[in-house]
Image: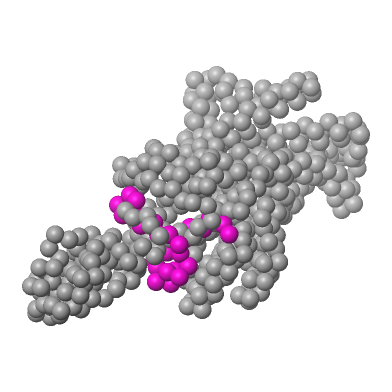
Amino acid sequence: MKVIECSNLTKSYLRKKVLNQLTFSIEENTITGLIGKNGVGKTTLLKILAGYIKQTSGEINVFSEKPFNSLLVSANTIFVDDQMSFPSPLQLHEILQAAGSLYPNWDMTFANRLFHYFSFDPKHYHNRLSKGKTSTFNAIIGLASRAPLTIFDEPTTGMDAAARRDFYRALLKDYLTYPRTIIISSHHLEELENLLEDVLLIKDGNNHLHLPIEELKEQAIGLKGAEETILNWTKDREVYYKNQIGTNTLYAVVRNEFSEQELQLAKENEIEITSVSPSDLCVYLTGETKRGIDDVFIDR
Amino acid sequence: MSLSTVNTSKVVKQQYILKLKANFDAFSSLVWIQLLAILFSLGGVASQGFQSDGMSVSIKYFSADMVIAFTMIWGLVTAITITTKPYRYYDFSFVTNRVTSSLSNILYLCTASVIGGVTAVMAKGLLIIIGYFFLDFQLLDYYSQPFHVRDFLIGNIATVLYIIFICSIGYFIGALAQISKLFIAVIPVLFVGSMLLDGMMGREPIAMKILSFYFQESSFSLFVVKTLISTVLFFAASISILNRMEVRK
């Protein structure tokens, strides 16, 4: 069953199109990573899914309903980010109770165990928490609500390394026991690699790539060797990234369409073949220029 | 994971309970506002006196109307406050849609109005007690007696209705202000401006006509009908405005 179906989704603010003819669908009980550079419309997309904002044009269906103003979608969806706000007079334990009274699948025991593990004080107030603690608390709400569609937008903002690791582990463990559809947007793809099943890569408000992470891992390979040899080898191929190392060495990331024999031949031509991590590949794929930040410093 | 169905009334009820708890501060400010109004009322609203044959009589009139007026302003402010962004966004951290959010707000405002209205009417009793024990009042007429069942009931119902009505206006103004901040300036300007204009042209201000339409109705049942219908219209208009509002954009 498809939980999210979205076709030609466009959202513009004033005259700037943030999402442009975005089309994709997400299957039930999968963990999808939403990847893209800053400002490509990840948060906008997630807020449309959660029914917070309305698209300018196009179709969006969550649980076969339009999410804007749908009580069904709201009851079965949770949107977690660092902007989540709760009534300021409520203490943390009261916020948990409030969430419990409204979310149909809420698991209070689980919430309390996480709450104590991350050593929160029940009598504390949400707006007095530090940045990392706020994210952790919001993540607890997100996990314990067990919403069939759980959306995390940059859930680990401000968390320290240990908290991030714990959060991802808790997420995975709970997902295995209670499978649900999870979407995580994050800049830390390398941390998420082992968690994700699918990757949705957004570029310029559009669906650039949507595929299982296993395929993404094999999508590209890196070739390093003498400039001339590399240029020769990458001719007529899709080159994602090129970088000059020293005077006569070139590193290129190309689409992996080589046969075994070709790779063998490449090695004989003294080309160093490396695999490309998904997070690096995503940076290359979403990069505006082929060279990157170094261009800024040329000819100064 | 299978989908959970929820019904609107259950969500509204839970949101209402949550709002009573979350907006409890409004009630503590109500207490202070009413105490302040009582303090002002202790000065009296009018006085008269006469002297003859070496005897002097002074009559002072006291009224707890100011408490009701202050409570109305409190209702207006409370209603405007809960339409502001932070208050609307709280709901969206949990289960909601725009209609349930407004319905629970309205229920909350009605509760606040009942509490505000009844305490405002009872403030009259407090005023009399303070006057009697501490300021040596001698109660003169029928209206100075603290308690008459029928008056008390009508007084309560009318006051509560007024406050709910004011709340619905506040909620409407708040909703308009969410469309554009311009309304925050436009509404007072229109209100004051029309009064000035009418004053200059030497005719009865339209604002006064509107006020007397509601506030000088002599038939109680007609008053109830007028106020309730207007209240429902204001709330309905607000719901339809807020129903299109994007949150956290």
User: Residue A180 in magenta?
Assistant: yes
The residue that appears at 42% across and 69% down in the rendered structure is A193
Relative to the observer, which residue lies in front, A41 or B219?
A41
Residue, x 67% and y 40% (percent of image)?
Answer: B8
Q: Against B63, is A80 above or below?
A: below
B221 to A185, vertically: above or below: above
Q: Position of residue A25 (x, y in %)?
A: 44, 48
Please state if A194 lies on the left or on the right of B167 as rendered. Answer: left
Q: Bounds of the magenta span?
A: A179-207
Q: Position of residue A202 (x, y in %)?
A: 34, 55
Residue B92 visible here: yes
Please give the name of the residue rendered at 71% of the width and 40% of the height, measured from the top-left corner.
B9
Near-viewer residue (B62 or B91)? B91
Percent from the top left, x then y, of residue B104?
67, 43
Judged from this view, the residue extending furthest toward the front is A261
Q: How is the image coloured?
A: one colour
Does A196 sit left or right of A177 as displayed?
left
Q: Is residue A178 left or right of residue A4?
A: right
The answer to whether residue A206 is above or below residue B53 is below
> Is B22 one of the magenta-colored residues?
no
Residue at image point 32% right, 53% down: A208
One can see residue B81 in this view: no
Image coordinates of residue A179 in percent, x first then y, are: 58, 59
